[in-house]
Amino acid sequence: MESKPKLAPFYMLSVALIGIADAFYLAHASYTDSSLACALLEGCNIVAKSPYSHVFGTPLSYFGLIFYLYMFAVAALLAYDPHSRGLRVGALIYSFVGVCYSAYFLFLQLVVIKAVCLYCLISSLTTLVLLCLALWHFISTRPPKEIR
């Protein structure tokens, strides 16, 4: 059972790669001002072209790309040093902040914009999975009570 907690960073790496691919596609479409390919939901381009898709003139997808690159880096460092308290806490806090922003953006899509973007949903789910994996890793790598 000792090897199970050490798998969490590798799962985080995989999930972060999904997030990187998703955010990169959105960032590329924003940079080239091209339309998104929306197969399941029709709201992708409505959400992407809305005024809520930019913060201080910067597309949200750029921030998402930075978020996932950071999570990938933290997961890689956790794979190397799974018991680092700073990395464990950092992954937990950063992924929690990501879930909070994702929840806010989901609220904007459903209530304000009234359109849903498939790629945004993928990003929200990916962020939630990263939080769950960070929490699993944090709990499973706690030192025994007598050492604390």
Image (spheres, rainbow, N blue to C red):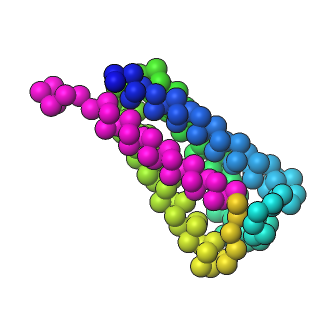
Query: Is 50 rendered above or below residue 59?
Result: below
Please report the bounds of the magenta region as a residue range. Answer: 119-148
Residue under the image location 70 percent in, 60 percent down: 118
**Percent x, y of residue 9:** 48, 31
User: Which secondary structure is most common in the magenta stretch?
Assistant: helix
The answer to which quarter of the image holds residue 139 is: top left
Q: From this viewpoint, is residue 19 visible?
A: yes
Query: Is 146 rendered above or below residue 131?
Result: above
Q: Quadrant of the N terminus?
A: top left
The answer to which quarter of the image holds residue 18 is: top right
**Percent x, y of residue 12:** 52, 36
Query: Is 28 rendered above or below residue 17?
Result: below
Residue under the image location 53 percent in, 67 percent down: 104
**Percent x, y of residue 8:** 45, 32
Tally of marks: 0
Query: Is 65 rendered above or below residue 50?
Result: above
- Front position in the image: 77 or 120: 120
Q: Quadrant of the C terminus?
A: top left
The answer to which quarter of the image holds residue 42 is: bottom right
Residue under the image location 57 percent in, 45 percent down: 67
51 within the magenta span = no
Q: With 47 as the anchor, is 73 left or right in this view?
A: left
Q: From this viewpoint, is residue 58 visible?
A: no
> Residue lying furthest left in this view?
146
Q: With 6 as the anchor, is 50 left or right in this view?
A: right
**Percent x, y of residue 70:** 56, 38
